[in-house]
């Protein structure tokens, strides 16, 4: 969910990765015409140009940034366009207490019910954060099949709060794991995110049995694949795509390896990944990138940062 996603799409193709990309929609003018809105035009153009590119490695979804950054007219139009194309819908939902309360005061509805009323949940939909949902919101999202994307590190860094993920799972919601963006997380390390989520809710609820390693791994893998509309990945199974990472378990902090699943969630580090494969193609192995020039990328990123920061 970011601006100029066409550049990201090209980078994804060059790297050999898979990604669901979207150009977020924002509109503050109730009279703005959706069909002449530049942001809507860019969102439609992204879908037309990139959806299915790279033999399906790229999927383009529709995106509404948030309730507080978009008008009812624009949300309804985006939902209709997404439905026409059978595209997914990605939103930020109830990230902060103020967002939740202000929406209720403005519309008499929580953000979840507001989006649902406008059709945003009519197809495949996934909602990031969901920290301040009510129990009624949980039931709505469950019944509508909306996948919650839990971003614990971002929510902690920004002081947004802690989503009650164990209760959501108990209520039958599908919860995936995310990092949010670099500005609100910094390292985008999914293995660190697994470690954090596995401990956070145990501490908040003072219950050490909450969120088993198996549940956490599902949040980081198969549940994420489900929200992306990729039923053929996210698990090691016959007929699934060869999208695989390998962990080097010959490390002191992973010894003894009597319980690989617990080791992965409680002990592993991002640097323990020794191989990454997408569609059977090795993209990274033992410190070497097969599709990317690491030194050039770091050099160009450093130059860009200096230019931006003056």
Image (cartoon, grey):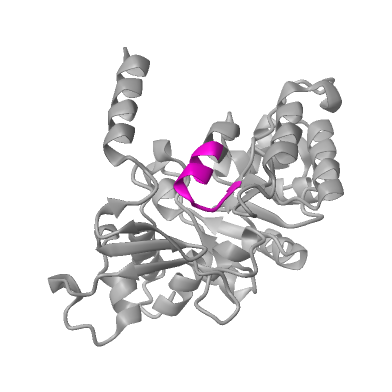
The residue at 52%/74% (across/down) is 235
Quadrant in the picture for the C terminus: top left
Image mark count: 0
The residue at 25%/64% (across/down) is 272
Please tell me whether residue 12 belongs to the stretch shown in magenta.
Answer: yes
Quarter of the image holding residue 294? top left
The vertical placement of 183 against 18, above or below, is: above
Please tell me whether residue 252 belongs to the stretch shown in magenta.
Answer: no
Q: Please state the horizontal and vertical placement of residue 298, each as a whole percent of the image.
A: 29, 34
The vertical placement of 26 against 130, above or below, is: above
Foreground of the two, 37 or 251: 251
Q: Is residue 196 visible?
A: no
Quadrant in the picture for the N terminus: top right
Q: Is residue 181 visible?
A: yes
Q: Please state the horizontal and vertical placement of residue 116, each as a whole percent of the image.
A: 79, 51
Q: Is residue 254 shown left or right of residue 10?
A: left
Q: Is residue 114 shown left or right of residue 130?
A: right
Q: Please state the horizontal and vertical placement of residue 129, each as a whole percent of the image.
A: 54, 51
The residue at 38%/44% (across/down) is 185
Residues drawn in magenta: 10-20
């Amino acid at each position: 969910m970011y601006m100029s996603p066409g550049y990201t799409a090209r980078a994804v193709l060059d790297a050999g990765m898979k990604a669901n990309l979207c150009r977020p929609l924002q509109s503050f003018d109730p009279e703005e015409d959706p069909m002449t809105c530049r942001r809507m035009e860019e969102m439609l153009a992204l879908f037309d140009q990139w959806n299915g590119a790279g033999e399906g490695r790229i999927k383009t979804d529709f995106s509404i940034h948030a309730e507080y950054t978009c008008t009812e007219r624009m949300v309804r139009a985006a939902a209709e366009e997404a439905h026409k194309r059978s595209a997914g819908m990605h939103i930020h939902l109830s990230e902060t207490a103020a967002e939740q309360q202000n929406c209720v005061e403005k519309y008499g509805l929580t953000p979840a019910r507001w989006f649902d009323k406008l059709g945003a949940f009519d197809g495949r939909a996934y909602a990031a954060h969901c920290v301040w949902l009510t129990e009624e919101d949980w039931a709505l999202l469950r019944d509508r099949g909306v996948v919650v994307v839990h971003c614990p590190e971002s929510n902690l860094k920004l002081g947004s709060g802690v989503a009650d993920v164990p209760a959501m799972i108990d209520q039958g919601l599908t919860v995936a794991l995310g990092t949010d963006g670099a500005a609100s997380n910094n390292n985008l390390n999914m293995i660190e995110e697994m470690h954090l989520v596995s401990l956070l809710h145990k501490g908040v609820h003072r219950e050490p049995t909450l969120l088993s390693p198996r549940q956490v791994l599902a949040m980081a893998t198969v549940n994420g694949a489900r929200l992306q509309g990729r039923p053929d990945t996210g698990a090691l199974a016959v007929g699934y795509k060869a999208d695989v990472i390998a962990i080097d378990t010959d490390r002191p902090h992973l010894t003894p390896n009597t319980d690989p699943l617990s080791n992965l969630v409680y002990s592993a580090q991002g640097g323990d990944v020794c191989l990454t494969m997408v569609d059977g193609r090795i993209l990274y192995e033992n410190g070497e990138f097969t599709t990317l020039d690491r030194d050039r990328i770091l050099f160009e990123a450093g130059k860009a940062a200096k230019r931006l920061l003056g």
